[in-house]
Amino acid sequence: MELIGYYASPFARRVGITLHLYGIPFTHRPFGPRPDPEEVRARNPLGRIPSLVLDSGEVLIDSLMIIDFLDELAGPQRALIPASGERRWQVNRLVALAHGTAEKSIAVFYERIRRPPSHVWQPWLDKLESQCLDGLAALEAALAARTHAGPWLLPGDMTHADVAAAVALQGINFDLPGLVPPGRFRRLEALSAEAAVLPAFAAAVPI
Ligand SMILES: N[C@@H](CCC(=O)N[C@@H](CS)C(=O)NCC(=O)O)C(=O)O
């Protein structure tokens, strides 16, 4: 199995971390859409990362769909989300929030870095940045509302929601230094620090 996409992408990184957490062997091909457009487009007609190339040669695209596939491969005992029930939609609810926050952060990144300064529309950039911060604030509020002990968003073991939340915050701090002042989302920072020391996170660091 081959994972296409560098870990500076929060979407590729979450897939890489999930593969490591599940103990699924894979080869990482750290291509990116800008330095390696042909390599990326050869696996994904949309020219985006991540893609997962299966041993059969079949290619899966989009981190959410890839992780859904990996959950089945890992099986119900190891999957970071139950197959059904309330906890499943609670995990997905929080993943959507964290994943959406990461999407907004990438939109900010493209506005700031890729667009010529003369073509940046500041009110649009301001809106994207505040959507990004609002997403983080909602995750922080979810952590503040917990009635259970432990570092994670939901009671018990770490779920996809925690991985997605940690990846979103770490990705924002990597791509957009200064956007989030340290201490602003201290519960989320604590969750992120807890996740960052796990071998799966350490094996998939953005460069
Ligand atoms: N919904 C997709 C988003 C993937 C995505 O936007 N990847 C970015 C890198 S972080 C990309 O490849 N952008 C290039 C482009 O859209 O042209 C997923 O979850 O995998």
Image (cartoon, grey):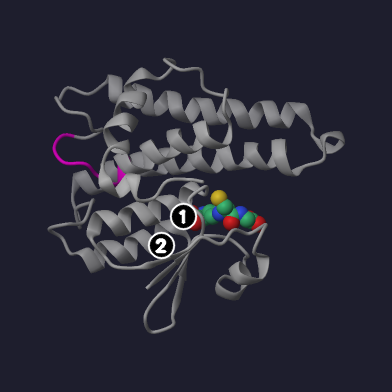
Name the amino acid, label 1. Answer: Ala
Q: Can you give x and y, in whole percent of width and height, for residue 187 in the image?
A: 32, 21
Residue 58 higher or lower than 140, as above or below = below
Q: Can you give x and y, in whole percent of width and height, for residue 3 in the image?
A: 43, 65
Q: Can you give x and y, in whole percent of width and height, for residue 206 in the image?
A: 48, 45
Q: Secondary structure at mark 1?
A: helix
Decide whether residue 129 is among the magenta residues.
Answer: no
Q: Could you tell whether 115 is left or right of 133 in the image? A: right
Q: Which mark is residue 203?
A: none
Name the amino acid, label 2. Answer: Met
Identify which residue is drawn at 74% across, 26% down: 123
Identify which residue is drawn at 29% across, 49% down: 200
Q: Is mark 1 within 8 Å of ligand 1?
A: yes
Q: Could you tell whether 173 is left or right of 74 in the image? A: right
How busy is the neighbourhood of tag 2: few (under 14 within 10 Å), some, or many (20 plus)?
A: few
Identify which residue is drawn at 39% across, 76% down: 54
Extent of the magenta region: 155-161
Q: Which mark is residue 65?
A: 2
The residue nearer to you, when weighing 133 against 12, is 12
